[in-house]
Amino acid sequence: MGILYDDVVLIRQSEREGEPSVITVNCPDKTGLGCDLCRIILFFGLTVVRIDVSTDGKWCYLVFWVIGNPSTRWGLLKKRLVGACPSCFLVSGISYYGAELLPPRPPDVFLLRFCCHDRKGLLHDVTKVLCELELTIKRVKVSTTPDEKVMDLFFITDTRELLHTNKRQEDAYDHLKIVLGDAMISCDIEMVVPETAACSQAPSFLPDEITEEMFNMDTPDERKIGSVGFRSPSIMMDNLLSPSHTLVQIVCQYHKGLLYDIMRTLKDYNIQISYGRLTTKENTECELDLFIMQDDGKKIVDSSKQDALCSRLRLELSRPLRVALISRGPDTELLVANPVELSGKGRPLVFYDITLALKMLNIAIFSAEIGRYVIADREWEVYRVLLDEGDSLSISKEEIEQAVWKMLMGWE
């Protein structure tokens, strides 16, 4: 197709602190590509401040203006973005890479099991190491013994697909040892058979009162967690401006993962973006114009379909995640839930943000688990964290909920 592999993704790093770096993606198009790219950008901790998207349905050109940080691994980011782009051969009709047309093989699941002496912030430190190693947490079971030891079970997959090798396992062990130090008692990694992997995804019971409170699909004009408000977005559709596209105009409050939330919603609805532009104002307000069409190449003229898409976008931008703090007898449990894409992929770094917020509050975690539940015909990833409030009673439940919410939204 006349484009080199290295030119599919180009990154121009900013020369001054605070100025955006520019990521350019030039590749064949596919429905949901924007969602996949935004998920990767979110995983690498970048803030998108502007975006331009254009496509003719076969080839697309995307430009992201992003704010990074000194620890951003730009080379690895480029590799992951390139990996998400379709091959040029798919557009040219050449079938040298027929494997790309086949559904991807489910990744191997591994069990990381370790025992160590407990301390505050431990779970976040371990989660940070796993994220840096590109080991994705599928499910976790953390429990504390009476003698203040922690037994952690992480069911994980490896983005690099190398965890079956001794070298990769030793590398993971070394990184964990550096963080845990003498607190580590034992650590081992083993591949689990598909039956065990399937069982690892089986969630525990979620009480009805929790599902009714957290997963209420009604969208208020403005929602609040303590003193933290979240304005309802303005979403308008227009079919007059373009003869072949529906224009969607969104004005909303900024939050971390905003673009990902929009893109995953459009992907789930099988909506194609022909042109789009996002601008932000001082990281507080965003304006987005999208020219879209259905997968049949037609604009959205059915009023019921328009209403359904607007309602879903409004819901996802008003409540991108659900956060609740509930009492379980004398204990307090933190619950955080995020919707899973129809592709089965979830929002990145949620557990990382939860554990970081609790670490900053100096709150110990007694137990934790991650599970997936089908609620109201949608799949949700639910994080359940039982808090050890032994010496943290000075912090109110409202303050805990606010801190977690602000961390997840990028408002810290």
Image (cartoon, rainbow, N blue to C red):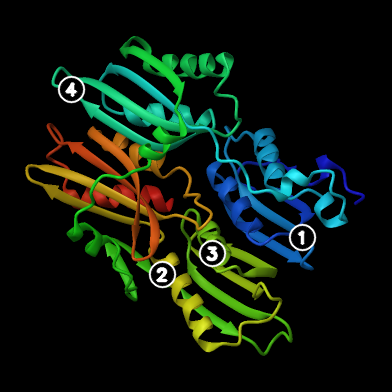
Q: Which mark is residue 268?
A: 3
SS at mark 3 in the image: helix
Q: Residue at x 55, y 36 (%)?
A: 107
Q: Earlier in the sequence, mark 4 or mark 3?
A: 4
Q: Earlier in the sequence, mark 4 or mark 1?
A: 1
Q: Amino acid at mark 3?
A: Asp
Q: Amino acid at mark 2?
A: Leu
238 to the left or right of 326: right
Q: Which mark is residue 315?
A: 2
Label 2 – label 1 distance at C-alpha = 28 Å
User: Which of the pair 393/352 is nearer the observer?
Assistant: 352
> Which residue is tagged 4?
145
Label 3 – label 1 distance at C-alpha = 19 Å
Q: Earlier in the sequence, mark 3 or mark 2?
A: 3
SS at mark 4 in the image: loop
Judged by depth in the image, the label closer to the viewer, 4 or 2, is 4
Tell whether label 1 touches label 3 (CB within 8 Å).
no
Q: Amino acid at mark 1?
A: Cys
Disc 1 packing (10 Å; few <14; some 14–19; many ≥20)? many
Looking at the image, residue 409 lies above or below residue 203: below
Decide if residue 412 is in sight here. no
The total of numbered circles placed on residues is 4
Q: Residue at x 56, y 50 (%)?
A: 39
Judged by depth in the image, the label closer to the viewer, 4 or 1, is 4
Label 3 – label 2 distance at C-alpha = 14 Å
Q: Amino acid at mark 4?
A: Thr
> Which residue is tagged 1?
60
Question: Residue 373, how many percent across, how many down?
Answer: 34, 53
